[in-house]
Image (spheres, rainbow, N blue to C red):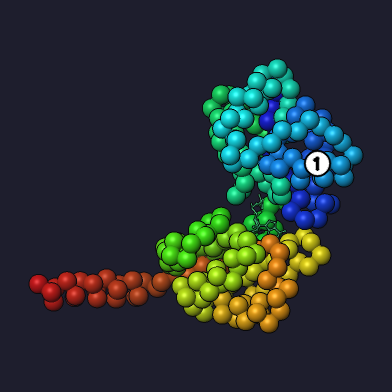
Amino acid sequence: AGSLYVVATPIGNLEDLSPRAARLLGEVGLVAAEDTRHTSRLLRHLGIAPALVSLHEHNESARVEYIDARLATGEDVALVSDAGTPLISDPGFVLVRELRARGRRVVPVPGACALVAALSAAGLATDRFLFNGFLPAKGGARRARLEALVEHEESLVFYESPHRIGATLADLATVFGERRLVLARELTKTFETFLDGSAATLMARLEADPDQARGEFVVMVEGAAPRSVGEVVSVEADALLTSLLSE
Ligand code: SAM
């Protein structure tokens, strides 16, 4: 039987496509792509024209049988998304889970991934981090998600779209106050920038220079300072005292 290759593609700079990824895209019998028109441009750049089929959040389950049947004939299939690593805030999870459950060979072909690129150059702690994907679109749900993260000591990483970056920074200011943030914008592209500071500082920077509010963002937040044993004990003592007094 054939293998499913999960192939990372560039997040901006085409030089980030690995030679192995380019070779495999030319060798497989079928490429399953989040958006076939988008992927066609990359394939044209590589000078190859493999058979393409769409695989996105609305048809992923329906595609499983089709792709499994192609693998059964011995053909290899590649899975790609519009940018970066498939399955990372992108389609592919249902397919990979199902194929693995059926004993098919699933092979990662690593490459660009915006969250790893952002963390690798941000200067925030990377020994432990919490990737949160996209925040909820609605304000109330977004703030609730952020509040649930406020005591985490790991660095926090979010994906964000350009039309919500302002609203998200405003919520980050409310929930995280003066906590240090790093915004990684347009990674690997011409206007790549890293901005560093509190949410309020970054909001002011984006308002002063609207160009800084355009493009794609990874938002990172420094983890909470570990609470000292003394603080933990005093919080517990306070709680105990309060409950004793109330009795
Ligand atoms: N699978 C992709 C990956 O491996 O990074 C992520 C796909 S997700 C749908 C798109 C989000 O990734 C964007 O909204 C942005 O938060 C982030 N992203 C992708 N490319 C980026 C870039 N060049 N610079 C900054 N962020 C980027």
Examine the image and state in which quarter residue 4 appears: top right
Nearest to the observer: residue 192 or residue 127: 192
Q: How many marks?
A: 1
Dividing the image into four equal quarters, which quarter contains ligand 1?
bottom right
Q: Position of residue 197 (x, y in %)?
A: 61, 78
Residue ID at (78%, 30%): 51
Residue ID at (65%, 79%): 207
Nearest to the observer: residue 143 or residue 187: 143
Examine the image and state in which quarter residue 94 appears: top right
Q: Could you tell me if residue 194 is visible in this image? A: no
Label 1: state its secondary structure.
Answer: helix
Q: Which residue is denoted by mark 1 in the rendering? A: 40
Residue ID at (73%, 70%): 193
61 w.r.t. 122: above or below:
above
Q: Quadrant of the C terminus?
A: bottom left
99 w.r.t. 210: above or below:
above
Q: Quadrant of the N terminus?
A: top right
| Left or right of residue 149: residue 220 | right
